[in-house]
Image (cartoon, rainbow, N blue to C red):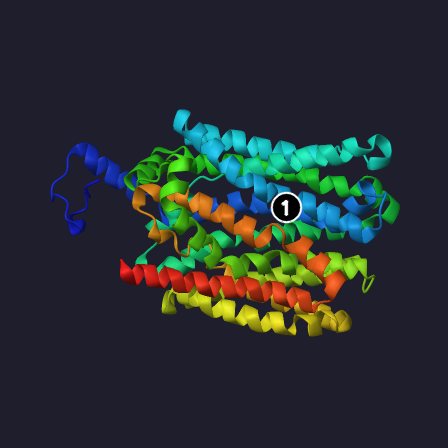
Amino acid sequence: MSSTYPEHGGAPEHSAEQIGRLHAHARVAPGEIAVGVIIGRTSEHFDFFVFGISCALVFPQVLFPFTDTLHGMLYAFTVFSLAFIARPFGTALFMDFQRRWSRGTKLTIALFLLGSATAGMAFLPSYRQVGDWAIGLLVLFRILQGIALGGSWDGLPSLLALNAPPDKRGWYAMLGQLSAPIGFLVAGALFLFLHESLSDEDFIDWGWRYPFFVAFAINVVALFARLRLVVTEEYTVAMEERELEPVGSLTILRTQGYNIFIGAFAALASYALFHLVTIFPLSWIVLGSMQPVNSVLVAEIIGAFACILGMIISGLLADRVGRRTTLGTMAALIAIFALITPWLLGGGKWGQDAFIILGFGGLGLSYGQAAGSVTSNFEMHLRYTGAAFTTDFAWLIGAAFAPLVALGLSMRFGLVAVSAYLLSGVLCTLLALRVNRALAARE
C-alpha cells in the first residue's frame, strides 16, 4: 500500500477524502489507545487471576474432595492450563468471524462468552452434589474462557506500537502491560476481603463465588469501553492505514510460523515468571501451612504495586537502551532470582514475602517489554494476526503449565526444581533473542 505521507515518499497533494482520512488517523492518539488496552486487558487478567487463586484456595475442597490437598491442587492446575491450550483455537475461530462480519461483532461475542463462562463458574455445584459432572462443567467453562480470550484480540496493542512516537515505544509498550498487575490487585484484594470477612465454612460454601459474579460485570464495562474506541471511524481508518486486518490462520502459521515461535520464546522467561510469583507461592505456602492465607495475599498485593513500579522503570529503560536489550538484561536478572529461589521460599515468612515482592518487581521489569518484542519481524499486513498468535503461544509455552509443573516438581524434588524450571525459561529467551538478532542481521 503506497504511503500518503509526504515524508514517506507520498504525493504532496491529497484529495479531500485522503485529507479526511489523515485527520481521522491523527485523532487516534497513543494515549487513547493505551487506555483502551489497559481497560480491556485488565478485565481478562482479572478473570484468569480469579480462577488461578481459586485453584489454590477453593477447587481442591469444592471439586476434588476425594483426594488429598496436593493432588486436588494439581488437578485444579491441570484444568487451569486448558484455557491456554484453547486460546490459539479461539484466535483462529474469531479471526474468521471478523473476516465474515466485523471487528465489533467479534469482540462483542468474545467478551460476552468470556464473561458468561466466568460467571457460570459461580453457579458450579460441588463434587458432593453432582459428582464428576461438577468437574466436567469446570473443564467446559475453562475451555470456553480460553476460546473467548483468543477471540478478544482487537489489535489495539499493535496499533499502539505503530502509533507510538519512535523515542517512546518502550513507554507505550509498558502501558499496555499494566493491566496484569492491576487485574491481580483487584482479584487479590477481593479474595482478601472475602477471606478476612467470612468464616472458612462460609467462604468455601458461597463466598468464593462472588468474584466470579464480579467478573461478568467487569467484562460488560470493558466491552463498552473497548467498543467505544474500536467501532469508531477514526480507529477503523487507522487500522486500515496500518493494514491491521486478519489473514488466514493456516496461512500465517505456514508462512510465519518461525517468527511466531521466536516471538513466543523471546518472552518465555517473563511468562514463566508470571505465574511462579502470582499463583504458585500461594499454593505452595498454603499447602505447607507455613503462614495464613491472608498474610500471603497481602504480600502479593504489595508485590503487585512493586510490579507496577517495575513496569514504569522498564518503559523508561527500554527507550534508552532498546526493548530487546532490556528483555535480554531482565532475563539475566531472572536467572539470578531463580538461583536464590530455594533460599527465599525456604526461609520462613520473611523469605517467602521477599520472594513474592522481589519476584513481582522482576516481573514488572521483564513483562513490561515482553509483548510484541519481535513482532516487528512480521510484514505489515501480517502483523495483526501474527501478533495475536505470538501472544497465544507465549502464554501457552511459558505460563500455562507453570503452576502445575512448579508445584509438582517442588513437592517431588524440592525447591531447586523451581529454579531449574525458571532457568530453562531464561535460556530459551536468550537463545530466541540471539536467533532473532542473527536473522535480522542476515536479512
Horizontal side of residue 42 vs 301, given as left or right: left
Determine the residue positioned at 26% across, 40% down.
23
**Which of the image's four quarters has the C terminus?**
bottom left
Determine the residue positioned at 74% across, 56% down.
283
Q: What is the three-letter code of the residue carrying label 1?
A: Ser
Q: Is residue 237 above or below residue 265?
A: above
347 and 8: which one is in front?
Answer: 347
Horizontal side of residue 440 vs 312, given as left or right: left
Determine the residue positioned at 50% across, 68% down.
330
Q: Is residue 255 above or below residue 321?
A: above
Q: Secondary structure at mark 1?
A: helix
Which x, y percent locates residue 219?
A: 58, 37
359 and 30: which one is in front?
Answer: 359
Category of crowding for the residue at label 1, using alpha-carbon neighbours closer than 10 angstroms: few (below 14), some (14–19), many (at least 20): many
Which x, y percent locates residue 373?
A: 41, 57
Residue indicated by mark 1? 81
The answer, for residue 111, to whether it is visible in the render is yes
